[in-house]
Image (cartoon, rainbow, N blue to C red):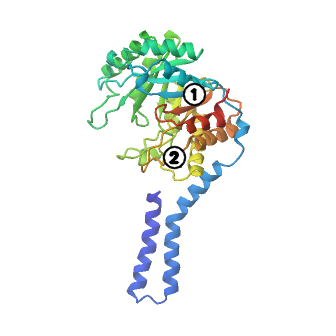
Amino acid sequence: MSWHIRPRCAAVLHSLRLALGRGGRTRAWLRRAGIAAALLVLMPGLAAGTALRLEYTGDPSAAGRTRGHDAVWLGHSWVDGRRDASDIAALKRLVGGTGIRDLYVHAGPLEHDGSLRASLYRSDAAWFIREAHRAFPGVRVQAWLGDVVSHGGSAGLRMGDAATRARIRASAVQVLDAGFDGVHLDLEPVYSGDRGFLALLDSVHRTTAARGVPLSVATPKIDPLPALHSTVGRLPGTPKWWSQKYFGEVAGRVDQVAVMAYDTGMPLPSLYGGYVAQQTALALEATPASTDLLIGLPAYHTDNMGHHASAETVSAAARGARLALARHARGRERFGLALYVDFAATPGDWAAYRSSWGTA
């Protein structure tokens, strides 16, 4: 926003300096000029806020209820020996009767060269997969594999390196051989337009398709404004937006795409919900009908500049997603919501998911 505001503010400030240099003929003129300068700064923000608030209005019930394509991210403790039968029973009470079909279970992280240490998941993966299938018939247990992506020589995965991509593919084969029902990739940050990432998806998808299991990917948000990703998206500490076109290229290469629709910095539930509604509409336009589209729900409660827990709630996200679905694609079956993340979710988060959308 600032690149549009600065020239106008500079002109107003220059006028103020000239007036002061002449002795400041009238206080009223200075007061009016000050108000004008403030409005020039505030109006774009007010317009954006009003637009997001309007996105949050309407009747979410027109979207209907869950289509049975929902998911939840589960932490590493499910496959490293820290869980037992009582935990399975507790998870069944949370998931049972909802539209959750996929469990993304953290089985990594990947090494920076793309390989995966089997010791990270070997102790309890087989046990959890067996017990999950018993507790939730029809639910798929996907191996959640992630790592940081290298940029500018930093440590991490190098998507442009064919050998790294081959090792990631081998890691996918490894978890499928261990009994997982699919592969869920969460590699961050992947910049918009990264061709190495697309090549990786093509390679891994050939493997999962040959086995008849899904390839899923977690994605960043889509540009809320045209070309925002190329303007500020690569600055340190800023969101890593994708263009809508690149999002569509990714969505067309996988069976399931889960948008991480959180960490927006929005200060109010209505603004955050409107932002999620906008993101959902953009994703609906770009996602092929053959691909599951899931919108991530923030079931965690960290407070910082990028995430205000009082604003980014499960209820606001679910309402925003449903409003967009009702407006743009209410007949779409391959749509769902995904809770992030089980070890931070409160009973209130689960209740909000159920009441807003998730009860089958």
Q: Is residue 255 visible?
A: no
Which residue is at a point 57% across and 22% down the rendered structure image?
92
Q: In what quadrant of the picture does the C terminus appear?
A: top right
Q: Do the residues labelled 1 and 2 touch (CB within 8 Å)?
A: no
Determine whether 177 is above or below 59 in the image.
above
Disc on res. 163: none
Residue pictured at 52% horizontal, 85% vertical: 28
Q: Position of residue 97 (x, y in %)?
A: 64, 24
- In the picture of the structure, the residue carrying the numbered disc 2 is 226
Q: Quadrant of residue 240?
A: top left
Residue carrying label 1: 94
Q: Label 1's element?
A: helix
Can residue 195 be seen here? The reply is yes
Question: How many other residues sit within 10 Å of disc 1, few (<14), some (14-19) or many (≥20)?
Answer: some
Q: Answer with mark 1 or mark 2, whichever residue precedes in sequence.
A: 1
Separation (CA) of disc 1 from disc 2 = 40 Å
Instruction: Indicate the position of residue 258 as horizontal and vertical percent values.
Output: 52, 31
Judging depth in this view, the residue of 102 and 216 nearest the camera is 102
- Residue at the image position 40 percent from the left and 82 percent from the top: 18
The foreground one among 326 and 355 is 355
| Residue 120 appears left or right of 220 | left
Would residue 44 be found to the left or right of residue 160 on screen? right
Q: Which amino acid does label 1 sit on?
A: Leu
Instruction: Tell me which amino acid carries mark 2.
Output: Pro
Tell me where residue 326 appears, x and y as whole percent.
70, 38
**Residue 218 image offset from top left, x and y in percent:** 47, 30
Height in image: 75 above or below 27?
Answer: above
Q: Nearer the viewer, mark 1 or mark 2?
A: 1
